[in-house]
Amino acid sequence: MIIAVASGKGGTGKTTVATNIAALLAEGGRDIFYVDCDVEEPDGKLFLKPEMTRGKTIKVPKPEIDADKCDGCALCREICQYNAIVVILEKAMAFHELCHSCGGCRLVCPMKAIADTDVEIGAISEGKAGNLGFLHGELKVGTPSAVPLIRELKKEIPDSADVILDAPAGASCPVVETISGSDFTALVTEPTPFGLNDLKIAVETVRILGIPFGVIINRSKSGYDIVNDFCRKEGIIVLGEIPDKRAAAETYSKGEMLFRAIPGFRELFENIYENIKIEIWKYKNSGEKGMAV
């Protein structure tokens, strides 16, 4: 079972939810992996404190242009959607900082003047936090896209384990790459106008992808119900609400697990996980695809 935890914006508590659910399940004896796909700023390690056991550098192909063979036809420039190739004085030049490694330029070059060269984009590390498997990626500064690293990171996940994917914030390509193929996506939001606005964008994204989803409201406040109102109107399940408590902020600031430190939070995260399991079961037995459940 693969559960992605995502959000429409940063700072909603996405990593708090992902790490607490993962650690809680591992503590209960489940074979589970936490995978931090927020490769531009991975911070799950600050809370889970894993002991790292192995790592590897990830490289992707980038174009290397042989100036002696290039005739300046500019077909490579025309096919590049990211303006990573320019033609100056009838010679093509490639800028690796803009290249997304699609390989199109090499395929269209009639003079066979373009070859691939491997360029480092980041690293993947694996470890253990008690019984919990841990994976994360770290994108190299200046790399234009996180997608290739996230794709390689997901390849490292063992087939036998259940998985919690901690997605990047927002609804851009790295988020789509992370949640694609998951059984369920939990969207973490906060009960504010900004939180609701970005939640709507995230909801639209998972609906387009056809992934079942539900909402977790973090820092929930009594009498402030704009997110609940939206979910009721849209037929979206609210998986749980995490109350706005000073103790939660203090525990978070120390890098500790909420379910271990605050009375009632263990039951809260257990209920959220049970609700996710119920929604996955309902979805798989409904025969309906692309619907919110």
Image (cartoon, helix red, strand yellow):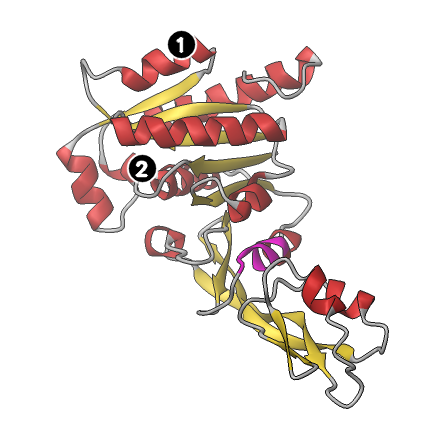
Q: What residue appears at the point 66 percent right and 72 percent down from the top-left corner?
A: 62
Q: Which residue is mark 1?
A: 232
Q: Nearer the viewer, residue 183 or 277?
A: 183
Assess whether residue 147 is covered by the magenta stretch. Answer: yes
State yes or no: discs 1 and 2 in contact (Cβ < 8 Å): no
In the rendered image, which quarter is residue 67 located in? bottom right
Task: Let me know if residue 78 is in the magenta part.
Answer: no
> Marks 1 and 2, how far apart in space?
20 Å
Q: Which residue is mark 2?
A: 12
Secondary structure under the numbered disc 2 in the rendered image: loop
Residue type pointed to by label 2:
Thr
**Where are the magenta residues, as a range?**
145-151
Query: Mark 1: which amino acid?
Result: Arg
Mark 1 or 2, nearer chain start: 2
| Residue 60 - label | none
Report x, y in % for residue 109.
81, 71
State left or right for residue 196 relative to residue 67: left
Is disc 1 surrounded by few (<14), some (14 to 19) or many (20+) residues within 10 Å?
A: few
* Residue occupying the far bottom of the picture: 68
Q: Position of residue 188 (x, y in %)?
A: 38, 32
59 sits left or right of 18 in the view: right
On the image, the x and y values in percent for residue 17 come to 37, 37
Main secondary structure along the magenta-highlighted residues = helix
| The quarter of the displayed image where residue 77 is located | bottom right
State which quarter of the image contains the N terminus: top right
Q: Secondary structure at mark 1?
A: helix
Query: Is residue 266 among what the camera can see?
Result: no
Picture residue at 52% right of the left edge, 63% below the top:
144
Report the side of 33 relative to 221 (left or right).
Answer: right
The foreground one among 38 and 80 is 80
